[in-house]
């Protein structure tokens, strides 16, 4: 454990621009450099293969990434019933809470949890209850577009990614190593 004796922060990366998960992974990399244990629970991602999953294997046991979503809900030809997405998000939140309270981790990343909130897959109350139960020295990062105002108010650090230009605007699809 980090044993820094300091206060753990609540950090939010939100906005319509690219880079929220990437920023959280940057924090994870820095934390691992200081000997911290990091857990990332992915709330929406789960059916695609992302490069960070292979990176986590290389950084294990210091970095653990657990995809628990059923894929992008209501986009990219999603055909799953919303109830399946809701059940997966609920299971991910419960898993994150149990792991958070285990004392095994110094940094917990709730990847795309803001999307789960925005889509109604999770209640804001349930996420706030998790934050209420946060150990004093644990840092938590919450990512995803559309962070609710209550979460922004609760956080210690909030960064909004704003899209200025994106290759997709020119019809260029997501690139391996950059986007996934």
Image (cartoon, helix red, strand yellow):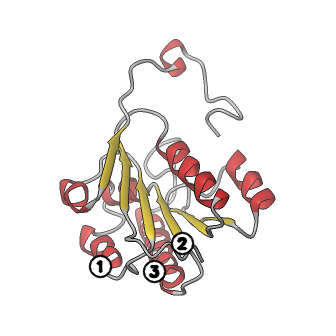
Q: Quadrant of residue 173?
A: top right
Q: Is residue 174 above or below residue 43?
A: above
Q: Residues within 10 Å of mark 3 (few under 14, many from 20)?
A: some
On residue 132, the disc is 1
Callout 3–callout 2 Cβ contact below 8 Å: no
Mark 3 lies on a secondary structure that is helix
**Which x, y percent locates residue 127?**
32, 71
Disc nearest the viewer among 3 and 2: 2
Mark 1 lies on a secondary structure that is helix
On residue 97, the disc is 3
**Which x, y percent locates residue 21?**
52, 47
**Which x, y percent locates residue 11?**
37, 56
Who's the residue at 62% across and 30% down the image?
Answer: 174
Q: Residues within 10 Å of mark 2 (few under 14, many from 20)?
A: many
Who's the residue at 51% across and 44% down the image?
Answer: 23
Q: Tell me the residue that label 2 is attached to.
A: 106
Q: Residue furthest top?
A: 170
Give the Cα separation between the discs numbered 3 and 1.
Answer: 11 Å
Mark 3 or 2 closer to N-term?
3
Depth check: 142 or 30 in front? 30
């Amino acid at each position: 454990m980090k044993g820094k004796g300091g206060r753990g922060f609540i950090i939010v990366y939100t906005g319509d621009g690219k880079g929220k998960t990437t920023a959280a992974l940057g924090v994870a990399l820095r934390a691992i450099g200081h000997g911290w244990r990091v857990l990332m629970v992915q709330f929406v991602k789960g059916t695609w293969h992302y490069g960070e999953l292979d990176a986590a294997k290389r950084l294990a046991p210091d970095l653990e990434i657990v995809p628990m979503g059923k894929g992008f809900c209501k986009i990219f030809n999603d055909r799953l019933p919303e109830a399946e997405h809701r059940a997966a998000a609920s299971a991910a939140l419960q898993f994150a809470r149990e792991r958070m309270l285990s004392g095994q981790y110094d940094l917990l990343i709730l990847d795309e949890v803001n999307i789960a909130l925005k889509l109604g897959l999770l209640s804001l109350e349930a996420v706030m209850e998790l934050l209420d139960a946060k150990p004093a020295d644990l840092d938590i990062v919450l990512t995803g577009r559309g962070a609710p105002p209550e979460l922004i108010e609760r956080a210690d650090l909030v960064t909004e990614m704003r899209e200025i230009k994106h290759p997709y605007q020119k019809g260029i699809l997501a690139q391996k190593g950059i986007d996934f």
